[in-house]
Amino acid sequence: MQKLNKTRTIRILRIIMPIVGIITAIIFVPWNAVLLWVAPLSDTVQGELDRGIDRGLDGLIVYVDRAGEDPALYAAGWNNRVEQVPADPQALFKIASISKLYIATATVMLVNDGVLSLDDTLADHFPELVGRIEYADQITLRMMLQHRSGIPNSVDHPDWNWGEPPSDLEGYLAFALDEPASFEPDSRYGYSNTNYLLIGNILDKVLGYSHHQYIQDEILSPLGLTNTYSLLSEVNLDDVFSGYHHDIEPDVKEIDYIGPGGSMIATAQDVGIFLRALIDGSLLSEDEQAMYSSVYEYEHTGWVLGYQSIARYDEDADAVVILFVNSTGGDSEATIPILYDRIVRVVRG
């Protein structure tokens, strides 16, 4: 009898479990992303932005710089959804990890000038980190630039809180100290914000002043970028696009992320001008360009609470396309890459 009941239970479970799986899949499918993916492509970039708003995104800014055409700015949705302030294409935005492109560029400039070497180890600059960051005497600047160091990603720590980031750089670094390495140095790729936090600290040390000032003097000013800032504290909050997370009210734009590689504020146009200059060789010398190409990429995404961004160059259209979205959580992480791809397809014509 006991064996019979066990057999019956197994049969029932075989029937129920697929049904549970189907129900779970239906509940957790990012339907906004799916519906956007299957929708007919619009004829215009603006039409795609409007579709993004229809699929639950709060506010959107797009900058397009296509060769042979005047650059164009687009916006849709809300800057401030509570007060129903329309999205302003010239608004400042937290560009998060797109900041890493600027730090990588500054690092290459300093290496080319002989101030740094790509073979410098973390221990060369911070011997006090030996024993606190595993393999500190083997991890090189090149590895940190390329995310091949194995240093743990601070934001993956179980105690990390996007809503309450540390108020000083020591607080950021603390999340990676005395933790086992994610892997042996240079054995594979593993994205880690801690790499660029440490690079920023190295730049500060060898310069004798803030790397933010170096970026201003050597990158932003030569390009005439007057709407790019290193820190949220440098700008008027009223000029910053509001940011929204799906289960947090009201907006989260007052949260300040000061860690190098994730702290910068800019307009979409300024990011687009920088990326075009980085790609076309007008920013770096020939030697610097070759070095940059060997250590980092020419595109990036960004994510902090309430803000997502994509900065890329599309070779087929010879176009730089920047997308800013002031929504995180819910279906937004699945929806935004699809929206960006659709916008690029429209730009290609």
Image (cartoon, helix red, strand yellow):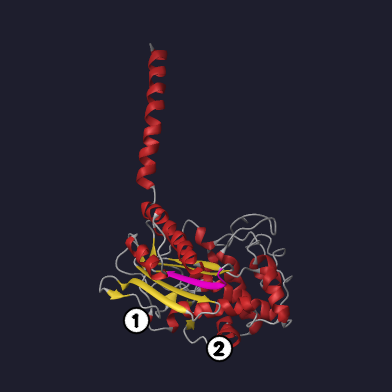
Camera-side residue of 328 and 175: 328
The spot of residue 58 in percent (x, y) is: 34, 66
Circle 2 Cα neighbour tier, 10 Å, few/some/many (<14 / 14–19 / ≥20)? few
Residue at the disc numbered 2:
221
Camera-side residue of 227 and 70: 70
Camera-side residue of 151 and 39: 39
> Circle 2 — which element?
helix
Position of 193 relative to 26 (above/below): below
Residue at (61%, 80%) from the top-left corner?
A: 204
Residue at the disc numbered 1:
238
With 70 as the anchor, is 330 left or right in this view?
left
Which residues fall within the magenta stretch?
317-324
Position of 23 relative to 262 (above/below): above
Residue at the far top in the pictured view? 1
Mark count: 2
Residue at (65%, 69%) from the top-left corner?
A: 128
The spot of residue 87 in percent (x, y) is: 34, 75
Position of 94 relative to 224 (above/below): above
> Circle 1 — which element?
helix
Per the picture, the main secondary structure of the magenta-coloured stretch is strand
Question: Residue 180, can we see it?
Answer: yes
